[in-house]
Image (tube, rainbow, N blue to C red):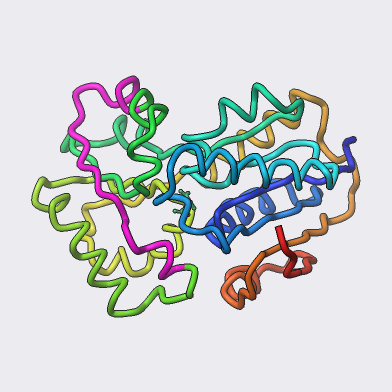
Amino acid sequence: MNNNPIGIFDSGVGGTSIWKEIQKLLPNEDTIYLADSKNAPYGEKSAAQILQLSIKNTELLLENSCKIIVVACNTATTNAIDYLRENYRVPFIGIEPAIKPAALQSKSKTVGILATKGTLSSRLFHSTAEMHAKGIKIIEREGVGLVPLIEQGKINSKETLNLLKTYLKPMLDEDIDYLVLGCTHYPYLAPVLKELLPVSVQIIDSGEAVARQTQAVLEKNELINPSPQLGRHQFYTNVASEVLKDFIKENKASYSVKQIDF
Ligand code: DGL
């Protein structure tokens, strides 16, 4: 079991931002990544649809003998992780917006969060925010339209810039000092965001925390791969995606990308 891969899924290319953190921290682990780009964006779907898609991805990863599953998607985590944990026997790692560290560090006591509609409307997001951000003003904005643009690789387009300006305006009007990126696609927007935000605003996401949690859960379950060899990485996508290849090409790890139907 220890040599089996870590399974990772997302609605598309965004979860590669999480894969990079996992690969950096756990270089000897093999991984299988599913980019369900055909069904992106998840954030605009109903909770029931998000659950069905999460089940489909989980079952494919389990058929491929994954020893642990990382739900590298805030929208799928906040809508499906409880069900997945109750119904499948492998450990699951989820990702939620980094509200807690932002709330702890904020001096202006006002933080912005950009996430999908599916995440912001979920019960799990609200209970986390209530628990960890008492006394903090949270300015929420749905990043409608951003995921499709990132899926097409249009990071630096005028359209992306204009959408971001619109979403950031109410946050900047309220003097946020932290911007929480509550979608795994959004770290790819960081260079554009940095140009739009004053230096006083910190951008924060949950990627590193998810990698550390993955390591902790593997250790606790005695599932760490003892091999001294560098891991191998298989990426599966259900659309022809040059963007996926583009997002991982800088990485020195050994990987393959295949288009399959799932
Ligand atoms: N990357 C996803 C997330 O973290 C989902 C985006 C989407 O498909 O709407 O929420």
Residue 261: x and y in percent read 72, 63
**In screen coordinates, is 160 left or right of 92?**
left
Residue 27: x and y in percent read 75, 52
**In screen coordinates, is 105 left or right of 235?**
left
Q: Specify the quadrant that holds the N terminus.
A: top right
**In screen coordinates, is 139 left or right of 54?**
left
Residue shown at 41% from the left, 70% from the top: 149
Residue shown at 43% from the left, 48% from the top: 45
Visible residue check, residue 250: no
Q: Quadrant of residue 109?
A: top left
| Identity of the residue furthest to the left in this view | 173
Residue 259: x and y in percent read 73, 69
Q: Nearer the viewer, residue 105 or 231?
A: 231
Q: Nearer the viewer, residue 233 or 9?
A: 9
Residue 16 vs 226, above or below: the answer is below
Visible residue check, residue 216: yes
Q: Specify the quadrant that holds the C terminus.
A: bottom right
Q: Nearer the viewer, residue 260 or 75?
A: 260
Q: Is residue 197 within the magenta segment?
A: no
Residue 39: x and y in percent read 54, 58
Q: Is residue 132 within the magenta segment?
A: yes
**In screen coordinates, is 49 left or right of 102?**
right
Residue 258 vs 95, above or below: the answer is below
Residue shown at 57% from the left, 74% from the top: 243
Q: Which residues are magenta?
A: 129-150
